Image: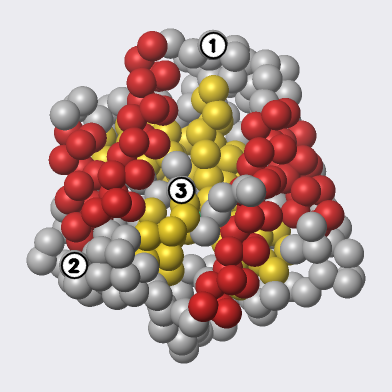
Amino acid sequence: MPFDAHDHLVPGTVTPERQVPRSITRPPYVGLQTPPPYAGDNTYSDAEVARIRAAGRIASGALDAVGEAVRPGVTTEELDRVAHEFVIAAGAYPSTLGYRGYPKSSCTSVNEVICHGIPDDTVLREGDIVNVDITAYLDGMHGDTNRTFRVGRVSTEVDQLVERTHEAMMRGIKAARPGRQVNIIGRVIETYAKRFGYGVVRDFTGHGVGAAFHTGLIIPHYDSAPRYDDVISAGMVFTVEPMLTLGTHEWEMWDDDWTVTTRDKSITAQFEHTVLITESGFELLTVSE
Ligand code: MF3
Ligand code: CO
Ligand code: CO
């Protein structure tokens, strides 16, 4: 019973945790309630960046594979299986599995789910959208990326939300330059989103990523100035992952303590890349080729 009479999503049945071969190295937080504190910073050497890029390539490739599997009739559980198999076949660990007790290898966030939807027996229907968020851990580094997929044909309103959320992410990324404060990113994203009257989620943010899944650096997607005044520098790595809605930016949490939905049940989309800041601009570290 994945949707109720109002077409709103309701919790489904979650299957037991998938196995990861013993030969694949786990991140340090697996089996702990909370990750060990991260002592490092958010800048990386070229050799370290190469390792984040390798992890990011696996996460992106997994999204490519999941995207091929998205169609009416598929369950979010099946999409998670595709993600899991791709990541472990590449020799990497699916970072969400066992992160603060999270039970799956991806997040699958359908329609009004803003983020952190848990894959279950929900059957996707023509016209739905599903965000799939995958992080791969390889050689001590995490690469974190998500995309929103359309299930068959979707309404024009939803189609434009998805397209513009991707555009908002790219505008935010392009605004990030050495010497600017990180709050430039959200300022640009929010200004663009407001043109269309979209809600801009504030309480879930981008983050430093690499040697830790979440390093402590916060990247807001709204204009947060004068807060979040960390100065961007070459060699920094963080995610940009805006969540835009057709209604409110306010949210509520399911009893599973993970699934975050819009309070008004309006449809919401998200895209995410792990980004390296360079002297002259940026490089996306979560790409497939
Ligand atoms: N990948 C998500 C992010 O972009 C985090 C998911 S944590 C989980 O930060 F535990 F919900 F999986
Ligand atoms: Co992220
Ligand atoms: Co993510």
The amino acid type found where label 1 is placed reads: Arg
The amino acid type found where label 2 is placed reads: Arg
The amino acid type found where label 3 is placed reads: Glu
Residue 218, horizontal then vertical, whole percent: 33, 66
Q: Residue furthest left?
A: 226
In front: 163, or 119? Answer: 163
The earlier-in-sequence mark between 2 and 1 is 1
In this picture, residue 241 sits left or right of residue 81: left
Quarter of the rendering occupied by the N terminus:
top right
In front: 49, or 123? Answer: 49
In this picture, residue 171 sits left or right of residue 285: left
CA gap between label 1 and label 3 equals: 23 Å
Query: Would you name the residue on which mark 1 appears?
Result: 153
Which numbered tag is attached to residue 203?
Answer: none
Which numbered tag is attached to residue 180?
Answer: 2
Looking at mark 3, is its residue's CB closer than 8 Å to ligand 3? yes
The earlier-in-sequence mark between 1 and 3 is 1
Total labels drawn: 3
CA gap between label 2 and label 3 equals: 21 Å
Which residue appears at 36% of the width and 21% of the height? 160
Residue 175, placed above or below residue 262: below
Query: Would you name the residue on which mark 3 appears?
Result: 272
Whether label 2 touches label 3, CB < 8 Å: no
Tag nearer the camera, 2 or 1: 2
